[in-house]
Image (tube, helix red, strand yellow):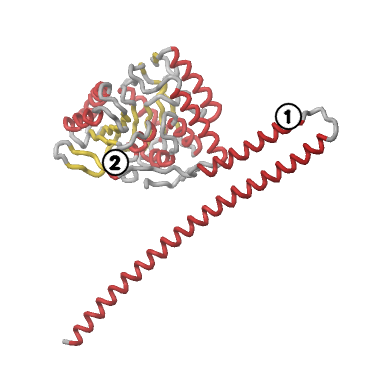
Amino acid sequence: MESGWITKDFLTLDSKLQREKEKVETLEKESQKLEDQRQKKDEEISFITQAWNELAEEFAELQNQLDHLSSTPRRTPKMLLLLGGAVICLVFVGLIFIFATSEKYAKIVRFKEEKFYLNPQTKEKQLFPSVEEKATLLLSVIVPAYNEEKRLPVMLEECLDYLEKKLKSNPKNTYEVLIVDDGSTDKTTEVGLGYSEKYGCDKVRVLTLIKNRGKGGAVRLGMLSARGQQLLFADADGATTFEDISKLQKNLDDLVKGESLESALGLVCGSRAHLEKEAIASRSIARTFLMKGFHLLVWLFAARSIRDTQCGFKLLTRATARLCFPNLHIERWAFDVELIYIAEHVKIPTGEISVRWTEIEGSKIVPVWSWLQMGRDLFLIWLRYSTGAWGLRLDSKEK
């Protein structure tokens, strides 16, 4: 009997010892992780310090040259040389600032509550799937929406009517519509849940964001929660005739050349440019002028394969979504440009198909401010990728 107690005590102590060993190993791993982070920060500080010292030496040398030049008559005024030196200094300081303040790889922030959707029939919250999982549907439609309680129903009626007809004609045309409420202050979520209750949460789901991310941030989180082999994002205002998705799907099939939509790469952009005779586009003069100017800047600094980067009607394969959206840094209006920039950089086959489009009242774009913001983001895309401050994690997964 005493021997049995000793054996039992020994096993208990051995179990405790094993747990303590596991704790020690965990602490060692955490310590190593912190040490790696410290070394990375030290390297960054060392880089900045070295750059600053080199800059100081350059400036000192320039000052010596200026002092020498000031003692002899020259054609170039001293003030002009000082101005040139100041510009050089500003450029160096600017580059240092860009590297010091930029996250090289995109960071995805998602609150715990945003990982679940509500089943309006059972009133239970269910976990969203991940785009990293295998597709279970043919098509996912992501609809970013900010304060769209009035315009959203019109778009959803057209969209769901088309998708239901396609499903009835062929049971393989399975779909889901994922409405992403981007921190709205109106009843956008309630409107979406009404359709979810009507069609069922297997067909219509609502992702409600606690904090406004911007259109790009909303589309990204929707893409990362989708189940389709093909993924389309479409604006909530219904400006694009939804049935034109068939034209995009045909072009996407041509791009993937018979490969599986699960693994093949391909991106097709709806366009308001006159690429086809039947294209119809109507915009106000002011918006057209601003759009043309922005397109020129995009062509000069970022993307040349797509003429109309800002049309909110783009279709891509699941593999393309897995690769591109975890790498997006821009969360506001110019995210489309970065998406196409990434696609061009990694040689993703792209297409541009003209769609019918009509300007709808109630646009969230503020004519001056929004375009200035897009111009700023465009400059950041070009500058930060060109200097290496931003990078792509081509094997990235949702964190």
Q: Quadrant of residue 258?
A: top left
Distance in Å between CA atoms under marks 2 and 1: 56 Å
Q: Is residue 278 left or right of residue 46?
A: left
* Amino acid identity at mark 1: Leu
At which x and y percent is residue 224?
A: 34, 40
Q: Secondary structure at mark 2?
A: helix
Badge 2, how many Cα within 10 Å: few under 14, some, many 20+?
Answer: some
Observer-nearest of 8 and 347: 8
- Element type at mark 1: helix
The residue drawn where x is 55% and y is 41% is 97
Q: Quadrant of the N terminus?
A: bottom left
Q: Residues within 10 Å of mark 1 (few under 14, many from 20)?
A: few
Q: Is residue 235 visible to us here?
A: yes
To which quarter of the image does residue 217 belong? Answer: top left
**Label located before the other in sequence (2 or 1):** 1
Q: Which residue is mark 1?
A: 80
What is the x, y in percent for residue 375? 50, 27
For the question of whether residue 141 can be seen, the reply is: no
Which of 268/240 is in front?
Answer: 240
Residue in the image at 70% along x and 35% along y: 85
Q: Read off the residue under disc 2.
A: 114
Q: Is residue 272 above or below residue 96?
A: above
> Along the line of sight, which residue is nearer the eye, 320 or 149?
149
| In contact (CB < 8 Å): disc 2 and disc 1 | no
Number of dots carrying numbers = 2
Horizontal side, residue 384 vs residue 237: left or right: right
Q: Is the residue 391 above or below the residue 232 in the image?
A: below
- Residue type, numbered disc 2: Glu
Work out which residue is located at the far top of the displayed protein and give it. 285
Residue drawn at point x = 29 percent, y = 26 percent: 147
